[in-house]
Image: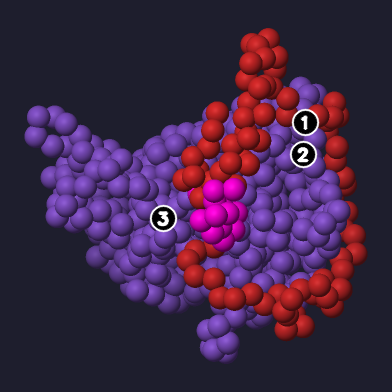
Amino acid sequence: MTATPTAAAPFTTVIGLEVHVQLQTRTKLFCGCSTTFGAPPNTHVCPTCLGLPGSLPVMNRTAFELAVRAALALGCKIAPFTKWDRKNYFYPDLPKGYQISQFDLPFSSEGALEVVDPKGALSRNVRITRVHLEEDAGKSMHDEAAGTGDTRIDLNRAGTPLCEIVTEPDLRSPQEARAWLNELKLLLVYLGVSDCNMQEGSLRVDANVNLHIPCDGGRIAKTPIVEIKNMNSFRSVERALVYEVARQYEEWQATKAEMGKTPKQTRGWDDPAGVTRAQRHKEESSDYRYFPEPDLVPVTVSDEWLAATRDAMGDPPSVLREKLAATWKIPPYDADVLVNQGHELVAYFQDLAERVGEGKVASNWMQQDVLRTLNERGGSIDAFPVRPATVADIIGRVAKGDFDTSRAREIFAEVLASGRTVDDVVASMGIAAVDDDELISLCRELLAENPRVVADVKGGKEQAAAGLIGQAKKKNPNVNPGKVRAMCLDLIRRM
Amino acid sequence: MSLSRNDVAKVGLLARLALSDSDLDTMTRELSSIVGFVSQLEKIDTADVSPLAHPLDTQNVFRADVPKPSLTTAEALQSAPRHDGECFLVPAVLGDTGAA
């Protein structure tokens, strides 16, 4: 983390993000066309989203409420009065010749989202400048292979509701930016605001970055701000920023060019090549000639409406982590791992923990067995064939002493692989509970075969008994190591 | 208040209008006269008037998030100068995709 210049990085990296997320609505922002992804081109279009003359937009209430939910979760102030504006520019995927967006009176502003690493390596409060609600443009496809030189336009996406989230330049490294985006995505998915699927374009990130470089005499030189676009994953965001920081530092050393002396530059990330490339200079804000959208009336948000939205919101991940840690007495690290996997996994864990009655035991099983095998198999936790009741059953038998934890793991794996019941698996694996008589005779045998261990233990070296466990397991794989140890010590003491 | 020829040329570029030199002369004269007319409003004292976001005194007009039938692709494309039965066709555009 580069908070201040160090020998390793003789400058401070300054990053701000602009994130667009598609809101989870059934229909577009201003018309009843479906927002379902992947439909054949131009099948989810109507006069309104095609921008045909005489059509009028009407605001989707769910879109507005989801946007407010996002802003509330980001700690933003909700404006009591908000309106929409036209942002004018020409592009073939923008059929009206303007985008309906928000300019001077966004519905919310001044929030913050903190990113905390439970291992303590990272903690940063990132201020949110504003959150506003706008419509998406369509999709342009440049069919170079066909060699026709035409661009094909699909307007299915035109008019899809987007929430734009703009941060203050509070991030200090590419790694932090990625961690913060992970937290933002988790939050928005938890609250049902967006599915944040980057492959489907439901979440898009642009990053603004420059460097603050201390010079002689205590002056700080600031490199020109670059906006990076075309990043298709959080990993790309991190890589593009790492590249851009190095590129800017090199350029500064060569040219000493500072902010304000050159216009703000837009660069596109070329993922396969691993470089950013200059794009055309961005139009100045005034070139968009914003003016109030006359086809939409303003929105006023009452206190009651706000309270109802807040009540319907559910816990954000940060609160859920604390609740899980407190309720089940698990370490913050465990709570973080579980919560970061999403709602469904947390529900699975809570079900399991309630049945087991021991949070830490349940958490260990979640992390070591359920999560590991889930990651190997892929798919969602809801479709995971071994349900909490079954895991709790296996854990319960360990507690009763039927078998030890490593045996229990094998049983879990076999139940998962075969789809059979725990009883079936236990029987077929020849795992039968070892009764006390069996255990006593086994331990007597062991002690007879290991006079040195007996002598060592009598001499005060109790740890020598550990050498007996492996031998016991060879004689009978179903024995409980703890019980073997206790029984052997007991027998030696009475000898 | 008057507009410069450069102002008009810039507005013309933003509106993607190809203005000849004589067009620019005419437009500069006519637009300046319109702006001059509207600028009479600046003489009014608006210190106590709150900004008007919309001429109608109506707020909170919403619709429910319920899908409605869309047009067919053929209907959507029928007025397009060029299409390929699926998509609108336009000359290749260079540069990035504008704003989002």
Tell me if residue A336 comes above or below residue B18 in the rendering: above
Mark 2 Cα-neighbour bin, 10 Å: few <14, some 14–19, many ≥20: some
Check disc 1 and report the residue beneath it: B54
In contact (CB < 8 Å): disc 2 and disc 3: no
Q: Which amino acid does label 3 sit on?
A: His
Question: In whole angstroms, how far apart are the C-alphas of marks 1 and 3?
Answer: 34 Å
Residue A33: percent from left, percent from top: 82, 60
Colour that chain A carries in the picture: purple
Residue A357: percent from left, percent from top: 64, 45
Magenta range: B10-26
Q: What residue type is labelled 2?
A: Pro
Identify the image quadrant of residue A359.
top right
* Callout 1: SS: loop
Looking at the magenta stretch, what is its main secondary structure? helix
The chain displayed red equals B
- Pointer 2 or 3: first along the chain: 3
Specify the label residue A294 is tagged with: 2
Check disc 3 and report the residue beneath it: A281
Quadrant for the C terminus of chain A in the image: bottom left
Nearest to the observer: residue A486 or residue A48: A48
Share a chain, discs 2 and 3? yes
Tell me the subunit letter for badge 3.
A
Report if residue B21 lies within the magenta region.
yes
Q: Residue at x 80, y 42 (%)?
A: A295
Quadrant for the N terminus of chain A in the image: top left
